[in-house]
Amino acid sequence: MSAQTTRDAFLGGLLQFTQPREGYRAGVDAVFLAAACPAKTGQRVLELGCGVGAAMLCLAKRTAGLRVTGVEVQPDYADLARANATHNGIEAEVITADLRALPADLRNRSFDHVFINPPYYQQTATTAARDSGRDTAHRSDTSLAEWIDIGARRLAPKGYLTLIQRIDRLPEAIVACDGRLGSLVVLPLAGREGRAPERFLLQARKDGRAAFRLCPTYVLHRGATHERDQESYTAQTRRILRDGAALHI
C-alpha cells in the first residue's frame, strides 16, 4: 500500500481491499451486485469492468469453488484486482482489456454468470471528473446496450446476467435485453422508506421465457430520515454488507 491507496475492509473485515485514495472507490453497489449473483460452487463467473475486484471477490468469498474471471480496461485497477485476490487468498483471473476488444481466448469461452456495474453516465452527458480513474469508472463511451450485449454473448445457454445501475436507465436496460435475454427480474433499491429508488438490480437469463417480474422496492436504511450520526442499515442490509449474505431476487 502507498500514499496513493488505502486498505479498506469489506464484509465485516472478511476481505481487505487496496483501492486508490482519490480514484474510483468500490462500495455498497459492488457488495449488492455480488450478493444478487446466484452463482453456485463449480460455476464459471465473469465480471465485466471489475475495477479493483471488490464485487467478484465478495462473490467468491460467499461461494467457495467458483471459477472467477474479471475484465478491467484500466491497467492500474486491474493490477490492484490481482493483488487484492492474492492478498485475500482467492484464486481469480483478471484480464486487462477493453470489453469491446476482448482477447480471442475469452471470446471463445462461456460463463454460467456474467455480472456488471456499468458506468452510470455516458461521456456526452456529464463533465469529466478530475481523476481519470474515477472518470472512466463513472462515465463511458460504451453504451449500456453494448455492455449488456457483450455480457449476453459470453453467457452459456440458460446462464444469468446480473447488473446494477441508476434507476433512470432502467428503460434503456430493459430494451437492451430484448432479443438477447429473457426472464427479466428487476429489484429497485431505495435509501429509505418513502423515497424514490435511486438504483436497481436487474437479472436476466439467456433463453429465458418467464414473464417480466418487478419486485417490491428494497430499502437499505431504517427510518424515513437520518436522525443520528450512526449506522442505520436494516438487518438484512447488515447481513449483506457485513456477513456476505446473498440477496435473492
Image (cartoon, helix red, strand yellow):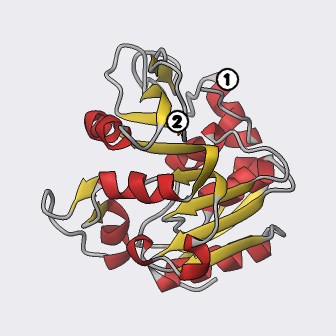
Q: Quadrant of residue 234?
A: top right
Quadrant that contains the N terminus? bottom right
Which residue sits at x=52%, y=36%? 203
**Residue, x 13% and y 56% (percent of image)?**
125
Q: Secondary structure at mark 2?
A: strand
With respect to residue 222, does 73 lie above or below? below
Between the C-alphas of marks 1 and 2, the distance is: 23 Å
Where residue 186 appears, x then y in whole percent?
45, 27
Q: Residue at x 59, y 74 (%)?
A: 106
Q: Position of residue 75 (x, y in %)?
A: 49, 85
The residue that mark 1 highlights is 235
Q: Closer to the camera, 157 or 173?
A: 157
> Residue 243 or 72: which is nearer the viewer?
72
Amino acid found under the numbered disc labelled 1: Ala
Residue, disc 2:
203
131 to 123, vertically: above or below = below
